[in-house]
Amino acid sequence: MLSIKKYAAIDIGSNAVRLLISNVIEEKGKPPVFKKNSLVRVPIRLGADVFVKGEISKANTQRMLDTMLAFNLLMKSHNIVKYKACATSAMRESKNGRKVVNAILEHSGLHIDIIDGEEEAAIIAATDLNKFIDPNKVYLYVDVGGGSTEFSVISNGRQIASKSFKIGTVRLLNDMVKKDAWQELEAWINTHTKAYEKISVIGSGGNINKIFKISGKPVGKPLTYFYLTTYYDTLQSFSYEERITELGLNQDRADVIIPAMRIYLFAMKWSKAKHIYVPKIGLADGVIKSIYYNTVSSNTQ
């Protein structure tokens, strides 16, 4: 007997807001299959408000209200069984973050959980990485966001260490990451990877997904450190406008892609990794799996 139910995850990040709807296919005697059904992304750059001014602007508050109402209607159309909405770095650092969350609940009926960096890293770790990794190898998992980046060391298929750093693409664009933050990250990576002779990086986030798509590499094949540095230099040789008109990048991607690459390149350099794998999974995928297995709280409509 086959059963197909739909679950939804909302990821309210510093650079964009996403709604992921996934089918969970259950068949007796077999493990469940998680299959993406729909992904909607709206580039509301909350971090540009919060990291500079300390709070979410009236304009972006209204955009959030409209977007969450639209997401709620989409979830109703899909007959969602359960959902979880997570707000990360920008919302948790905003002086009016709780006020915005309450306004969204009143306006759209959606419950939003503001999660800390450690919980964010734990949910990301719940993603179905086992499909993409060799259990006999060691990996540094790097999930780059607008406000923070989550790092995890994975050895023999198990998470050995995990930490969230306030180094993200929107912060870097606004020159808000100091030298000591980079030094702390370098020390953490060195400490947790020096025992391993060989390590690869797993990259997560919209920017590395875009770079992987542009590379034309087949799924499952890694990008090299050389390719990433070469493409980084290419991007820097174009102006912001040229990245849109000549390279075909979306306007909300054309600026953050460069600081995102800096983070991935430093992670590879400091861990001495020569390859980066891009499985195209992230926080929303982890949320879907976590609510299915009841390892996090969830909501029904």
Image: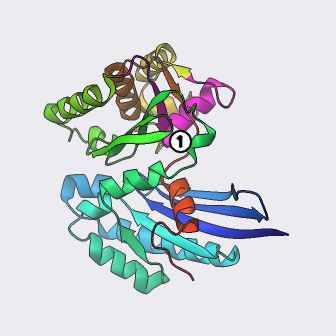
Residue type highlighted by circle 1? Asn
Residue under label 1, please give it. 250
Q: Is residue 290 left or right of residue 62?
A: right
**Within 10 angstroms of label 1, few (less than 14), some, or many (20 or more) residues?**
few
- Residue furthest to the left: 180
**Residue stretch in magenta:** 196-222
Query: In the rendered view, would you say 291 is above or below 150?
Result: below
| Residue 253 is at least partly visible in this image | yes
Q: Which of 286/69 is in front?
A: 286
Q: Position of residue 147 (x, y in %)?
A: 31, 49
Q: Position of residue 116 (x, y in %)?
A: 30, 59
* Colouring used for the render: rainbow
Query: In the rendered view, would you say 275 is above or below 20?
Result: above
Looking at the image, which residue is at 61% across and 28% down?
214
- Residue furthest to the right: 1
Query: In the rendered view, would you say 23 is above or below 255?
Result: below
Q: Quadrant of the N terminus?
A: bottom right
Q: Quadrant of the C terminus?
A: bottom right
Looking at the image, which residue is at 25% across and 58% down?
50
Query: In the rendered view, would you say 38 is above or below 296?
Result: above
Q: Is residue 215 left or right of residue 96?
A: right
| Residue 42 is at least partly visible in this image | no
Disc 1 is placed on an element classified as loop
Q: Position of residue 169 (x, y in %)?
A: 35, 41
Q: Is residue 217 magenta?
A: yes
Q: Position of residue 277 (x, y in %)?
A: 54, 29
Q: Is residue 214 left or right of residue 298?
A: right
